[in-house]
Amino acid sequence: MGGGSWATAIAKIVLENVDHITWYMRRDDSIEEFKRLGHNPSYLTSVHFDTSRITFSSDINEVVRTCNTLIFVTPSPYLKNHLKKLKVKLHDKFIVTAIKGIVPDENLVCTEFFRQVYNVPEDNLGVLGGPSHAEEVAMGRLTYLTVGCTDEAKAQRLAECIESSYVKTKTSQDVIGIEYASVLKNVYSIAAGICNGLKYGDNFQSVLMANAVQEMNRFLRAVYPIERNVYDSVYLGDLLVTGYSNFSRNRVFGTMIGRGYSVKSAQIEMEMIAEGYFGTKCMKDINRGLHVNMPILDAVYNILYERISPTVEIKLLTESFR
């Protein structure tokens, strides 16, 4: 469900293990161009598909009606809009979210949104997480993914569908923790980008990431206190790859902010969604009720939404680190 780079990468992975998929894309012109070219016309154009093994559709109701497992890969700010036309019930489907973001206005991670708004039972909700740039998946580079679901059998079945010579998988029951971690790592990636734009070096970036994983752990313990190893790849690994890699659109966005771009101008020039921008505000709102000590989140929020100078705000943040 979705036509972007990560949706394209996931489709590539799944088609290595199953004979056929149904692929929902919003625009008919994109579908026709995909069929003509044999690849996504807008994202990961080097990945070619056997389109005879794909049923494309822009009718979300038809797709939901005919499929039992739905992998949502739309940007979180657009999820509600995609679902507006939906009339088919979702409660008996296995809903997997590969969306590393939070639903704006609702301030809910995506599985909680599906549970509360669409009455999908907890055992029918899954999440796909881990350090995974779509561009590297497209190149067949080794990637480690984690499938989260409270129903271990469903998690295992999905893990088997995406495992390959270059994709290693594991399962977890920490659905909520994985989702919040994936939101926060985008926020911290923006922070890393801002510091990069301000010419802070590798020495400081490592301290920033060390403090970020501690901040993430404090929040996860407050919002969903179960036994977890925050140094696992789905938490720390995803944080590091998003904070350091030039493939990271959130890091690129933050770098532009650090160099003096306004939020609007950075968004226009990127032409892609930096979900951490929306996630920053949502997480700030959520934390107002939890009161977790989150200085990095606060600094990014102040820069993006309160228009505090990045130079001033990051200088204050550096003084809180040791």
Image (spheres, rainbow, N blue to C red):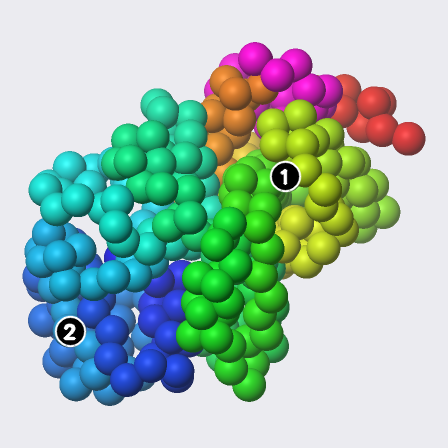
Q: Position of residue 231 (x, y in %)?
A: 76, 51
Numbered range of the magenta stretch: 288-306
Q: Secondary structure at mark 2?
A: strand
How far apart in space, not on screen, are marks 2 and 1 (Cα)? Answer: 38 Å
Q: Nearer the viewer, residue 297 or 129?
A: 129
Q: Residue at x 47, y 25 (%)?
A: 282
Kindly identify which residue carries mark 1. 188
Residue type highlighted by circle 2: Thr
Q: Residue at x 44, y 62 (%)?
A: 154
**In the rendered view, would you say 48 is above or below 270?**
below
Q: Secondary structure at mark 1?
A: helix
The image's mark for residue 55 is 2
The residue most toward the right is 322
Left/right placement of residue 224 relative to residue 110 reads right
Q: Nearer the viewer, residue 49 or 55?
A: 55
Lower position in the chain sequence, tag 2 or tag 1:
2
- Our reading of the magenta stretch's main secondary structure is helix
Quarter placement of the C terminus: top right
